[in-house]
Amino acid sequence: MTNLAMPHPYHLDNWQKSISDLITNPNELLAIAKLDPKNSRFSKLATQVFPLKVPRQFAALIRPGDWDDPILAQILPKVDENTHSTSHSHDPLKEAQFTPETGLLHKYKNRVLLITAPHCAVNCRYCFRRHYDYQSNSPSQIEWKQTFDYIHRNKDIEEVIFSGGDPLALSDRRLAWLINQVEGISHVATLRIHTRLPIVIPQRITKEILEEFENSRLKIVLVTHCNHANELTKITEHAFAKLHKAGVLLLNQSVLLANINDKSLTLAALSKKLFSQNILPYYLHMPDAVQGTQHFAVTELKAKEIMEELRGMLSGYLVPTLVREDPGAPSKTRV
Ligand SMILES: *Cc1c(COP(=O)(O)O)cnc(C)c1O
Ligand code: SF4
């Protein structure tokens, strides 16, 4: 007999339960993927540098028995991560010099980026923040005041970007407080939220958060972070439909990742599926040269060839802009 009171394994009614019940044990992940943990590709050592963290319903999208599954490849700690590369570093973007206040990055004239949350719902192996010291970059209450004072003083700032970590990993209350601070700065017109949560835990898009967005005087832009069409499901479609209806502009950024999405056909399928869920492709990032991620690297020559093919396959508005981040440049660099 089935027990009706038994919670659904993915806590579909409660995103907070999902986020506090992540898969952190590699053996569990490999069991779901139906793969042998003794296989040499998996590395326990890599989890000590950057822990394994995956929401259960995201892991459920893995095609079993396939080491090259595009979702598994984004989350599985591999031996390749332990190779030291002289062309890669811990802070390739030299972000410290653009940090006038704790947790605030001011690199580009009219917009600032805030490190609003010290963690994410998923640890992506290619992450450029895998070595980031969230501890010493998490503002205290006094430092938050200084951060918002900085934005108040700088009348050039028209857009505030919530980044992280993942801003939607914060509680609704915390998020509402942050949005409220931004709303109080009259020269800021746009709030942008960079997040992977609607992809990995779509039920994060609650009635409360939708109301928060609907009632804000700010223009809200939500930039999702999705690298492969397999990440988009009926459940994400539902979440994005609600955001779209609430007047939120939906964009996506991807990272160009070797053996995951470095084919024009794969990227074309991603763009089309994003569009079917009300999302427009925004950026396709060259991976940053972060230590431990060199096996994801794609050369610029190959990237340009892929883009050329992609332009022949898609409407112009479905082609993302290929960009690279150069420390000190006044904007992202078009490749
Ligand atoms: C990427 C980035 C932005 C946003 O740049 P857009 O080109 O507007 O998307 C803003 N601030 C920082 C520090 C960034 O790294
Ligand atoms: S969600 Fe973004 S910031 Fe968080 S681990 Fe993944 S790539 Fe990094």
Image (cartoon, grey):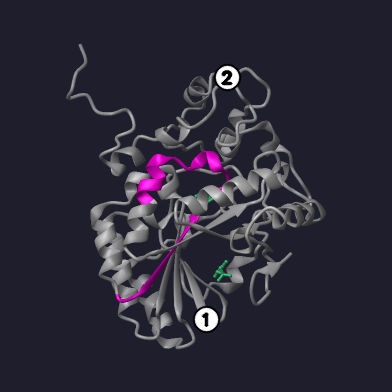
Taking the spot 68% from the left edge, 59% from the top edge, the residue there is 92
Q: Earlier in the sequence, mark 2 or mark 1?
A: 2
* SS type, badge 1: loop
- Residue 292 makes an appearance in the image: no
Please state which of residues 230 and 316 is positioned toward the viewer in this rendering: 316
Q: Position of residue 219 (x, y in %)?
A: 38, 73
Taking the spot 31% from the left edge, 74% from the top edge, the residue there is 181
Q: Is mark 1 within 8 Å of ligand 1?
A: no
Q: Which residue is mark 2?
A: 35
Q: Is residue 22 above or below residue 116?
A: above
Please state which of residues 164 and 236 is positioned toward the viewer in this rendering: 236
The residue type indicated by label 2 comes to: Leu
Taking the spot 65% from the left edge, 54% from the top edge, the residue there is 90
Left or right: 4 as drawn, with respect to 32: left
In terms of image quadrants, where is residue 94? bottom right
Q: Position of residue 100 (x, y in %)?
A: 51, 76
Please state which of residues 104 and 247 is positioned toward the viewer in this rendering: 247
Q: Which residue is mark 1?
A: 110
Left or right: 224 as drawn, with respect to 216: right
Magenta-highlighted residues:
217-239
